[in-house]
Image (cartoon, grey):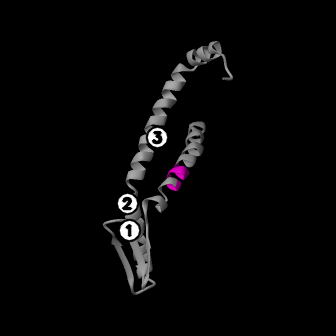
């Protein structure tokens, strides 16, 4: 609606390789995000086991199990907390890794 057809054709000709390259990178990134989100149970269970170890040094009645319907459940005494897919922190982890990579990778190329 803003650009005319001649400008769009010029833009596509000039930046064709860049568009193809970054489309490929975007596809790989999408697959990585998909893999991380499918692996939420593995990461949540690992975090739950670490917390069980830490809490067992402080409390005597620490409980940890992976429920068949949900995810990992961690508890002390009568208090129980379950980690579900939506609150597992996978999206935040991916966001942090992405921002970190955008900061670090250009810095490495400047150093070498």
25 shown above or below 98: above
The structure residue drawn at horizontal position 49% and vertical position 35%, both measured from the top left corner, is 26
The secondary structure type at the circle numbered 2 is helix
Image mark count = 3
Any part of residue 62 in sight: yes
Residue 19 % position (x, y): 53, 25
Check the image and name the residue furthest to the top: 6
Please name the residue that numbered disc 1 is placed on: 72
Check the image and name the residue furthest to the left: 68
Residue 70 % position (x, y): 37, 65
Any part of residue 49 in sight: no
107 shown above or below 14: below
54 or 110, which lies in front? 54
Q: Earlier in the sequence, mark 1 or mark 2?
A: 2
The structure residue drawn at horizontal position 38% and vertical position 68%, both measured from the top left corner, is 72
> Answer yes or no: do the residues labelled 1 and 2 have beta carbons within 8 Å?
yes
Boundaries of the magenta span:
92-97
Measure the C-alpha gap from mark 1 to mark 2: 8 Å
| Main secondary structure type of the part rendered in magenta | helix
Please name the residue that numbered disc 3 is placed on: 29
Residue 48 % position (x, y): 41, 69
Please name the residue that numbered disc 2 is placed on: 41
60 or 104, which lies in front? 60
């Amino acid at each position: 609606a803003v650009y005319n057809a001649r400008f769009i054709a010029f833009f596509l000709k000039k930046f064709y390789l860049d568009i193809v390259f970054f489309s490929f990178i975007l596809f790989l990134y999408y697959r990585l995000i998909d893999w991380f989100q499918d692996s939420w149970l593995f990461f949540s269970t690992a975090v739950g086991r670490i917390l069980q170890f830490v809490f067992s040094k402080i409390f005597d009645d620490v409980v940890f199990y992976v429920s068949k319907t949900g995810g990992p459940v961690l508890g002390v005494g009568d208090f129980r907390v379950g980690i579900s897919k939506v609150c597992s922190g996978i999206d935040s982890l991916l966001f942090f890794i992405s921002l970190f990579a955008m900061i670090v990778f250009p810095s490495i190329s400047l150093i070498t």
